[in-house]
Image (tube, coloured by chain):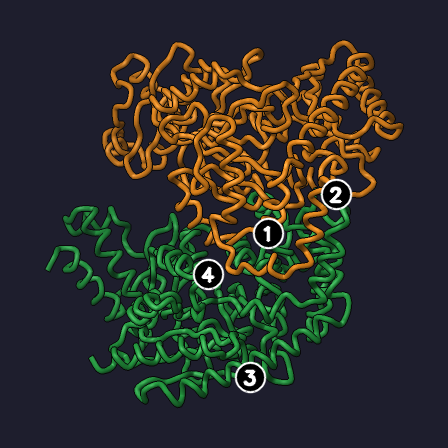
Chain colours: A green, B orange
Amino acid sequence: MYKSEQLAHSLKQLIENSTWRAHEKLPSLRQQAEQSGLSLITVMNAYQELEAQGLIYSKAKSGYFVAEQHSTRLNPVLAINDKIEINSIVFKYLKSLQSEFIIPLGSAFPNSQLLYSPKLIQSLGQLARQRRSYEQTPSLPPGNYALRKIIAQRYAMQGIPTDPSDIVITSGGLDALNLSLQALTQTGDYILLQQTIFYGAWQAAERLGLKVITIPEHPEHGIDLAAFEQAILKYPIKVCLLMLNSHNPIGFTVSDEIKLKIAKLLNQYQIYLIEDDVYEELYYDQKKPLSMKYFDQQNWVLHCSSFSKTLGAGFRIGWVYAGKFSENIQHIQLMSTLSVNPFIQNALVEYLSHRHYEKHLKTLRSTLQRYKKQYFNYFKSHLPEQCKTIYYPSGYFLWIELPEYMDSELIYQQLLQHNISVAPSNLFNITNQQNHFIRINCSFEMNEKIQNALDKLIEIVKININQ
Amino acid sequence: MYKSEQLAHSLKQLIENSTWRAHEKLPSLRQQAEQSGLSLITVMNAYQELEAQGLIYSKAKSGYFVAEQHSTRLNPVLAINDKIEINSIVFKYLKSLQSEFIIPLGSAFPNSQLLYSPKLIQSLGQLARQRRSYEQTPSLPPGNYALRKIIAQRYAMQGIPTDPSDIVITSGGLDALNLSLQALTQTGDYILLQQTIFYGAWQAAERLGLKVITIPEHPEHGIDLAAFEQAILKYPIKVCLLMLNSHNPIGFTVSDEIKLKIAKLLNQYQIYLIEDDVYEELYYDQKKPLSMKYFDQQNWVLHCSSFSKTLGAGFRIGWVYAGKFSENIQHIQLMSTLSVNPFIQNALVEYLSHRHYEKHLKTLRSTLQRYKKQYFNYFKSHLPEQCKTIYYPSGYFLWIELPEYMDSELIYQQLLQHNISVAPSNLFNITNQQNHFIRINCSFEMNEKIQNALDKLIEIVKININQ
């Protein structure tokens, strides 16, 4: 055993037998080195090992502290990821989607033929010919007032009182997430993510140098509330970033009951939530699922959404319900993208001011529902029984569970040889667990070409199972 | 005297009498504390004081080192700005420009009536009606190939061999600067800026937590080469960010001779240059000024530009000649804005593929020259003789020097009462020196309203002089 491991081991005993109590400060690195006669480096390694095990936590400039102990303390689903390096994986994956010959079952974007509504194209065409559409210079943050007003009204329709000044327009949904996270955190802060989540959340954490705690998905409820509270108790978490409606990639929508409980916990422990809700409009039920803003009494929630999944990602228009953080976020925008294209904002105002959008959404939802059902039935009847196709009634993703011993990255690589892309689960989960899932984009009409692609996928899965 | 000051004083003597030599490592904080019997905090304060005086410098994870000593060592024009807080000033200033009733002599943007060329509007109008203009999803970094090819050809026309793969399209010029700076630096790195420069450079440095060294403007050459070399010798500068053509706010263009020397220094000392060249097309001479890329043999220069000052800031299209850093910058884009609006990129390709742009630029340049001359003559004949109007033959800014005892921020405030904006020099210079300048935007036709505004400006300057 290395000296650092020996030290870690004996310190661990002090914590486990409660000689050291929760939130008690550990001796400084130097004190510990002097006491133990070990080198500073050895002590630091031991402390880092204990931190990785979740037994202690560090606070910038204050040192190390004993974490809260729980009977499920060593629950492996709580993972600290000090250094995240998902970006290169995502980069390669997105580049692989760029070829025009690829069948994009791995794409995150809905089939563009279902978006870009003709009425919107008409508005764009009309406005594009008028120079005043472009001229609002400087079109500064927080963005077009009329557009913010329309967005505010849509919140109000769901029973969430909203003022246009609460809304900041952003260059798409990812920009909204990034700006929110930047406004609420500093390098080294702890944030909480779902174990499996849209890779943009990992990328944002990587970019800002944040420490990530993950909680597992609950097989039934989507969110594992017990793990959530446990993580909050154990780590000095400042911000959660969660997807609760039509979760990407899995697809679940969390119940109102659970959302209410999360809201109470946020308030109780004074933790911010950045809610990534870009799929909020793609529900199949009669009623739109509520966002966490509905349950948020004290401004702990920053709600991020966009028009990318309903009108088109090419517009690069998203927003954040920033509330009291509006000015802070505008400051960060001024230092980066400066402003959002005024012409597109104008065209959206024109389009959204009529009933076109609701009609478009209705058609979009029923088409996605029909397609997804078709894909689901196809997989159900053709995939080997060791596989499970997970269907939730919203969005356009199917989440396929392969046998646990399989690595979906390999399936992805093999399909790529045939110009077919799928999204392997290591794009959404960096803990190296649960690497046997793939996400399928079902927003493409099931023609011969698509069916051949699905058949190839099924064939390759079968080959890998038989090996 | 505090203990830390005493320590700083005695260490300073060791450096000045050359007991400690340039680039020699100082004792670590802990060693120094043990040797001197002082606390770690006291030692740290002393080291930070010496660092602020430019006598020593720090390297991340390596400790402190003795800086190069020069006879002009205490030259006050080299300022370290550990903590920059210009963003709030800029935010207030930009917000003050947003009212539609304001006369925007303080605006950074050219009069939009001179931009948004009718032929471009026509292209936009045509493309806007076709859904394929928007659909290229995901329209990922590095951006539209045809657009990058056209930009590469424009470099080639100036004798700079360029491949489309060298170019990355960005959401405007500020985004290009930010991405470049992010790609080349880490928190705590030293960068070099001109003492007076576009506030976006300060904002970028603030956002990334960089240490800034400034060099003064040379009254004749624009860049003070001696100060430049001195700064490079004295500090471990990693990146310079400079404006050398139609400098904002002052207006000068640096000669080819000086540019060549800068290029040699970059190569000699292995320092990167981010060149902010967004005004490159607004020269009045026969020949476009060369960019630093022309003199750059070894890929030390990242050249940033945009269409904001020639076609319209509302398009949010810029680019960086990133060369070997292209992939690095694309990674950062993927984590933030994701991509640039594909429709606008398509429309620019359509427009730039014909000769419209050259014609438009020719008209734009001659109009700006005519207007600027008018403003210059007006100020020359009406401003009190204690003021100096500084004219350079390019762009659309005049730089007015008020008597040294005046604070241009006050003039700005007083004019704002009359719904007139000007840009005070504290937006461009955070060293609290040279605060007696204002920048005037001369891109508006001198009608009665503008003339009244200029008269009000002159009146307020006169009142302040007589006080």
Q: Is residue A128 above or below residue A418?
A: above
Frontmost residue, B247 versus A122: A122
Quadrant where the C terminus of chain B sits is top right
- CA gap, disc 4 and disc 3: 26 Å
The reply to the same-chain question for discs 1 and 2 is no
Contact check, label 4 and label 2, Cβ < 8 Å: no
Image coordinates of residue B106 in percent, x first then y, are: 72, 31
Amino acid type indicated by mark 3: Arg
> Which residue bears the numbered disc 2?
B98
Give the residue drawn at x 36%, y 20%: B233
Q: Earlier in the sequence, mark 1 or mark 3?
A: 1
- Residue A100: numbered disc: 4
Contact check, label 2 and label 3, Cβ < 8 Å: no
Amino acid type indicated by mark 4: Glu
Amino acid type indicated by mark 2: Gln
- CA gap, disc 4 and disc 2: 43 Å
The reply to the same-chain question for discs 1 and 4 is yes
> Which residue bears the numbered disc 3?
A370
Quadrant where the N terminus of chain B sits is top left
Q: Is residue B412 above or below residue A297?
A: above
